[in-house]
Image: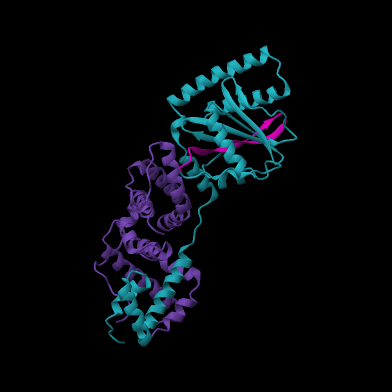
Amino acid sequence: MAATVVARGNVSGLENKDFEKLAIPLLDGLYNFARWLCGDPDEARDLVQETFLKSLKGFSSFREGTNFRAWMFRILRNTFLTSRTGLERRNTQQEDKEGFEESSVSQDSPEIALIRRANTELVQAAIAQLAPAFQEVILLADLEEMKYQEIAEALDIPIGTVMSRLARARKQVREHIVLTLGGRRTVGVK
Amino acid sequence: MTNCEWREKIGLYVDGELEPREEQGIASHLQSCANCSAAVLEQQALKKAVRVAGKRFTAPPELYASVHRQMQPKKSTGLWLKASALAASAVLLAIVAFAWISRPSASNATVAQLIDQHVTMLASANPVDVVSSDKHTVKPWFQGKLPFTFNPPELAKDSPFTLIGGKLIYAQQAPGAELVYLVRQHKLSVFIFQARDVHGQVSGTNLAFTVNGWQQGGLRYYIVTDASREDADRLRELLQDANR
């Protein structure tokens, strides 16, 4: 989804209308992301509602030319991080190495077949076992199909960190799948 | 395992993050390097698997509804509401007095009823039952509630009119739709009934309200507003065009 430029009106009603048009199409994606973050439907619902409330209030200060989708996801994530669950998860979050780690693909890869064989539940389990920092980046990249720059804006991290986390997240998902389906085969060895 | 110069770029390539020149370079390289091709295929398979599995949850309908409610402008509360409630009470009083003094004809009775409805809407804290500026939300809301259908106009981006929402109403014991629009600070009620149910095709000014009525496609439309006659005419044209 391309960045959306918002024209700001003088009348508050028109601003709300603009906001509604831009924000409602994002609701499903925001809720899905919130569910992954929170793990609880009620908490996710509250998180999305609070996100909409905050973003509506802040819409008048929304800078034209800013990526609206990244802005909304950023508000949701910041709101989550200040919630009880968010604080708990942040305290247990794994440290990740900075710097772009090369995607660790086995070159002669029957893993392709294993990945293709993986059912949805297995991949969901693989995503669920990721540390929150990796989980959010892989969801924004592969599910929301955000560009690295958008992800960097949404998560407020440098683009290099996006690439690093994404590579590690994919490596871990892949390992989970391959180890589950393929037994003891070594994966990701370079 | 080979150590291609492109090896590090495979993730960027799969994510569409390379410059066009680099992208062409790696695409050519893939023609001759089986290892990198396999790596690309694997990354693509993994990306697809995550996309499918990641879309796990769908927002429940009640979340959509509560978010819609959150987004409605709050300007109807506070001083404005109090002032409008006072004004509406005064107008209601005038209407009641008018009803006592005059014995209205069938047409006038319809108009008086619709003005009542409009004034009640103005004074209400919940002026509409379906709250949305999107006609594709408002129109379906009436499905199953009315024995007819209609098309709210598609409003251009620069249109002075804003759709606020709609509600189900009754006049002369017949069900109808009330759509509420905003033009500048004035609200306009558009009432729609089956023509056979409601009588009285009146246009003009009544108790200083502009009333604009017409019949089209078996339906009878009335616009009631304190906005200018020109605004009512403009909205009528939009409705007529949308329902041709």
Q: Which chain is cyan?
A: B
Q: Would residue A159 be found to the left or right of residue A139 on screen?
A: left
- The residue lying furthest to the top in this view is B101
Position in image of residue A112 (x %, y %): 43, 80
Position in image of residue B167 (x %, y %): 60, 36
**Can residue A140 be found in the magenta stretch?**
no
Please tell me the colour of chain A. Answer: purple
The mark total stands at: 0
Q: Is residue A106 visible?
A: no
Magenta span of residues: B158-179
Whether A128 is drawn above or below A54: the answer is below
User: Looking at the image, which residue is at 33% across and 48% down?
Assistant: A64
Q: What secondary structure predominates along the stretch shown in magenta?
A: strand
Q: Nearer the viewer, residue A12 or B151?
A: B151
Q: Is residue A139 visible?
A: yes
Q: Would residue A145 be found to the left or right of residue A162 on screen?
A: right
Position in image of residue B197 (x %, y %): 74, 33
State the image quarter where residue A137 is shown: bottom left
Q: Would residue A94 be found to the left or right of residue B199 on screen?
A: left
